[in-house]
Amino acid sequence: MAEDFVIEMLHITKVFPGIKANDDITLQLRRGEIHALLGENGAGKSTLMSVLFGLYQPEQGVIKKNGEEVRVRDPNDANRLGIGMVHQHFKLVECFSVLDNIILGVEDTHYGFLQKAEARKKVVALSEKYGLRVDPDALVSDISVGMQQRVEILKMLYRDNDILIFDEPTAVLTPQEIEELMEIMRGFKKEGKSILFITHKLNEIMAVADRCTVLRKGRYMGTVDIADTTKEELSRLMVGHDVRFAVEKKPQVPGEAVLDVQHLVVPSRVHKKDAVRDVSFSVRRGEIVCVAGIEGNGQSELIFGLTGLEKPASGSVSLLGKDVTNARIRDRSKLGMSHIPEDRHKHGLVLDFSLEDNLVLQRYWQPEFQNRGFIKRGEVRTYAERLIDQYDVRSGQGPVTVARSMSGGNQQKAIIAREVDKDPNLLIAVQPTRGLDVGAIEYIHKQIVAERDQGKAVLLVSLELDEVMNLSDRILVMYEGEIVGEFDPKKTTVEELGLYMAGAKKQGEAKA
Amino acid sequence: MNKKTKQPLLQNPAAISVLASLLSIVIGLVLGFILLIILNPGEALHGMKAMLGTGFGSMDKFGKVLYQAAPLMLCGLSVGFAFKTGLFNIGASGQYTIGSFFALLFAIQFQMPWWVCLLAAAVGGAIWGVFPGLFKAFFNVNEVITSIMFNWIGMYLVNLLMANMPKMLASGWGAPNSDRTAALSSANTGAIIPKGGLDKLFGNSSWINISIFVAIAVAIVIWVVLQKTTFGYELKACGLNRDASQYAGINAKRNIVLSMVIAGALSGLGGGIYYLAGTGQYVLQKSILGMGFNGIPVALLANSNPVGTIFSSLFISYIQVGGAAMQPAYSPETIDIVIAVIIYLAAFALLMRGIIAKAISGRKTKGGDGK
């Protein structure tokens, strides 16, 4: 090995209960290169970086610095080795000034009093050298997200780190800020610092990276030189094209539109940008429309807007010709909207309720289950027993099982039983198979297809391209809050979708 | 073999709750006893006997236990009911004060019969509960802060109103003092809650009246509301998971307000029941009444279960009556400390529940018998 590797992670394996997050992964970082780490959600990128940063201990594999084996037991060890990290979610004290945040943890004191003059000089010098514009005295709570990120970068530089990890640094930035960040990264490279750049945006990799390591489902897919590759190849490496489940689906002619969305804009809860920007589409009877995209591109907010969990800023949503843009959630439900939510613990279930109480969560108020405000416990029990039987929901004590004690797959089945049994006109399913085992996934796919075959309109949001390709009759790709393409799954490929999902391509203003 | 039949019982959350509450009480009593030894070693055993024995010692004293338990029970129900909706009603005291005022206002000023006065007390408490509810629901202002404020506002408002209503005060009815309300025996005997013959049963106890049955009936009604109705279902859903209840189309804002209104009405009713017994007069206060606050340990001890509240309020009332009997060997202040220690420990019921649950599940995994 004549090559000059500053950090090597060799054959790293990290196992969590029930899942191999990293399976024999090797990553070698050359001195003075920008090395991208590419992979879908759940591919194991974060786990790998946590191992490097000392947050997890791997079951197998070694880490070498400058060719010598080292142990990273905690982030302090990482810091001593010169490894710094800008986390996706910044770790800043909001009510401290920029300078205080930068020196926090390594501050100089003299008889217990802070000595900030030296620190300030160093920070100012660093910020000028690398073009990292910050105001040392501004409070972090008052500055923009872009500047907060620069503070995080300065924190690494202040600690004289020369191995810099950026975890999805561009997710929260505007295009101009992204351009600036790229420039800064190139500056570091010139200084001989080594950069690990975690992302799933292909354009950015092509723009700044020298090499790229690709992970898929916890496995190492290879390392490629950016100069010798294309976005298409990277995309294929990232998502793979092995089809895991063939779902049997009869051809179906879609009927009338059930859901019609026009120019919908939904604000974000996290940042000031709108999460959904001017989105228009419709879902017809007997078709499964799938919203594909990389996590965090506005899919969740789109669904919040459609289901009433978040108030749209503008635009309209209509269900069977009725305007429901600002309708109450209960009224949407009465009009036949069913919603399998993304977060089953947060929205889908009252975990401390019994299974039967959860199964009637959307219907307890119907005459079938209550009489003058008194719940018909007998009816609830009978209904719950039927659903448990029909949808094969397994639990310790049947209807009276506390939902919290059930397995994730059975919790999800309970939600699906509840939502499907409502006999909806529109079924909205958000990542219905996330975190489930193969058997449960297959079952849930069958249920969704059965709903479509009965002439229901189905809107599916999924991050899994296999699922998207298998289930959908029509695919909408979302990128940064917009629908950037519409596809027929029979006439497109995973690679093509990947390009749109990563923002490399966009269909010219062609929207229905 | 024996273990196998026992385990399901110990895994039953209700059984764990009862066990936790009992354990907390025992620990509280032990600590209280230690405190008695420290304060006055010679009298400790005797004092403890007084505390534990007095309540059942005579029918008169037992009557007093029941008499004090009734308002305590209602305050406990108030706090517990709000807890079920995920709200901490620390304003029970203010609601209790306003309820007392409404009851006495209708009794003395308007000369109404006792049951009208009780209804008025509930309405008064409800009015005092609605404000923290509205602030919480529509502006997301923490209900703890607003209800603490409303405790003080309520107390001084009542003082102000009473001081300016000459007919309300004892001095308006021929008595010399003007720092308290008129005794109902002289102002309006029809407003005194009937004894229903209980006084004879309880050895001519001056304390006892039907209020304990009113309180128990209310507790059962609250239990039915929470367990059997769609309204209770919605309240609990809101309390356990606000997001999921929103997802299910439950109007969380409405439920928060209603929950505080009902909690307020319960505390207010407690105030009415206490002052309409005819044995006490409302003294213009300089500090917030303790009854509302005592509702918090009552609710905690019962784990917010309305039926449990019946027992926890009886327990706390019992040690209060017993504590009073420790005089003169102990001063009233030290007795209060001992009672406070016991009540304080009782509030550890939740913690204890966690410990027990952990111990049981720990044993289960050790036994390797879990799935």
Image (cartoon, rainbow, N blue to C red):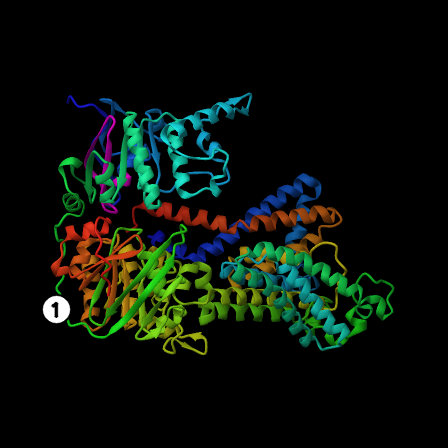
Chain hosting mark 1: A
Residue A200 appears in which quarter of the rendering? top left
Residue that appears at 55% across and 58% down? B299
> Is B249 rendered above or below residue A60?
below
Q: Is residue A27 magenta?
A: yes
Q: Nearer the viewer, residue A186 or B30?
A: A186
> Is A373 rendered above or below residue B286?
below
Q: Amino acid at mark 1?
A: Lys
Q: Nearer the viewer, residue B164 or A375?
A: B164
Horizontal relation, residue A182 to residue B116: left or right: left
Residue identifier under label 1: A250
Residue that appears at 25% across and 72% down? A257
Q: Position of residue A479 (x, y in %)?
A: 27, 53
> Is B218 rendered above or below residue B325?
below
Numbered disc 1: secondary structure: loop
Classed neighbour count for the residue bearing mark 1: other residues with Cα under 10 Å, few (<14), some (14–19), many (≥20): few
Q: Which residues are magenta?
A: A19-47
Q: Nearer the viewer, residue A216 or A139?
A: A139
Residue B130 appears in which quarter of the rendering? bottom right
Q: Position of residue A18 (x, y in %)?
A: 24, 46
Horizontal relation, residue A503 to residue B60: left or right: left
